[in-house]
Image (cartoon, rainbow, N blue to C red):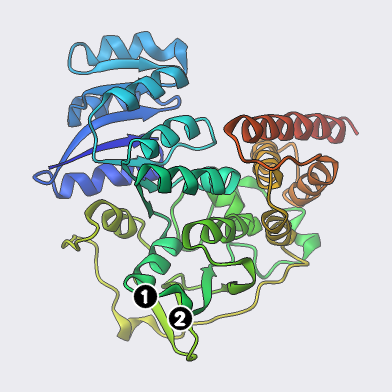
Amino acid sequence: MKRVAILGSTGSIGRQTLEVISWHRDKFKVALLAASSNVELLARQAESFGPQKAVILEEDKAPFLASSVGDKAEIGVGLRGLEEAVASVEMDLMVAAMVGIGSLPAVLAALKAGKTVALANKELLVTAGPLVTRTARMGGATLLPVDSEHSAIFQCLEGRNLQEVDRIILTASGGPFRHLSWEEMARVTPEEALRHPTWEMGPKVTVDSATLMNKGLEVIEARHLFDVPYERIEVVIHPQSLVHGLVRFVDGSLLAHLGPADMRLPIQYALSWPERWSSPVRPLDLTAVGMLEFYPPDLQRFPCLDLALRAGRAGGTYPAVLTAADEVGVEYFLKKLLPITHIPLLVERVLEEHQPLPGNTLDEILAAYSWGKKRAEEIVQILIRR
């Protein structure tokens, strides 16, 4: 049985991971569950799956977790408790799905120990891609993508020589606002942004999908996951969300990965790899698909994509600052204190003010991220007071 640790077990990916594990109870043992704040759900998950350890990051919620779980699992508290749990729990696979970069030290520790890590957290590779991949190589660890797009590319590339690859093509649904003008975008509400036309995701990722920041972050991830330069990674808008990724080879042929818009499939592949297992997800019916559309992205209407590409190419600590500023912008948009069109303006200003470092160490990355959050908060407060 594979022993699995899930960081971010109460989020969208974490919940779906546990659903997949429930389909295959004979193949998995949940060793560790960790959540940022949803202590009630974490307690129910611990009751159902019986992990060795359960970790809650918000320290004031630890007493509730301890009283709810009792002696069924050891309790860990805070980021230090998470690192200690990762170091002490025997695991074969870690699912890294915790939002933000707080889990980065714990993930690096797992990679140093040679564990397989299924990455569902964009921030880790975006902010610390070279550090994460270098740590994985040095530890002899395996990185597996969980994002539907990166899982698709991973599957298209299996057994292939990268010298044969001409281009990686990531598809984007375009979100709910792909037909709106910039002026119309300025009036959209958080409720409208959270109504994604094809995917069910957490609030942060859903808003990033509406601005196309999400796709820019995925380009940076793809650069590090597949060791392909930026000029050979392309984004196309595909509203149907049925083609999750394509690889074009040097002879001009394309391999595409198609499937239903259901995150449980790429999650299961990361858990079952290198095998494929049956699942109850309804297969894609090609006769019912109809037309498949593909369009180039409009960088003028969706400047977040361009900002992410520029930050990725600049490298160093720019991607960490990009991530931090975007998190602040999305937070205030969801609070209805900032229009969605101010998110790229905020990100661009913070990037322009940043004095970059090489980003070769964890300390440099964390310092840049912290500076980016602080500076973005300061700028937002000025905008709100106007």
The furthest residue to the right: 386
Write down the residue under mark 2.
164
Please say if 180 is above or below 114.
below
Residue type at mark 2?
Answer: Glu
Tell me whether the residue at label 1 lies in contact with that at label 2, contact meaning CB atoms closer than 8 angstroms: yes
In front: 33, or 365? 365
Residue drawn at 35 percent across, 16 percent down:
76
**Where is residue 220 drawn, in percent x and y?**
59, 57
**Where is residue 255 drawn, in percent x and y?**
40, 81
Quarter residue 232 falls in:
bottom right
Q: Secondary structure at mark 1?
A: loop
Q: Is residue 39 rendered to the left or right of residue 193?
A: left
Q: Secondary structure at mark 2?
A: helix
Q: Is residue 231 rendered to the left or right of residue 9?
A: right
The furthest residue to the left: 26
**Where is residue 322 drawn, in percent x and y?**
69, 45
In front: 383, or 105? 105
Write down the residue under mark 1.
160
Please say if 249 is above or below 340.
below
- Quadrant of the snapshot with the N terminus: top left
Residue drawn at 37 percent across, 81 percent down:
289
**Where is residue 222 drawn, in percent x and y?**
52, 61
Q: Which mark is residue 287?
A: none
Quarter residue 265 falls in:
bottom left
Q: Is residue 271 rendered to the left or right of residue 308?
A: left
Residue type at mark 1?
Answer: Arg
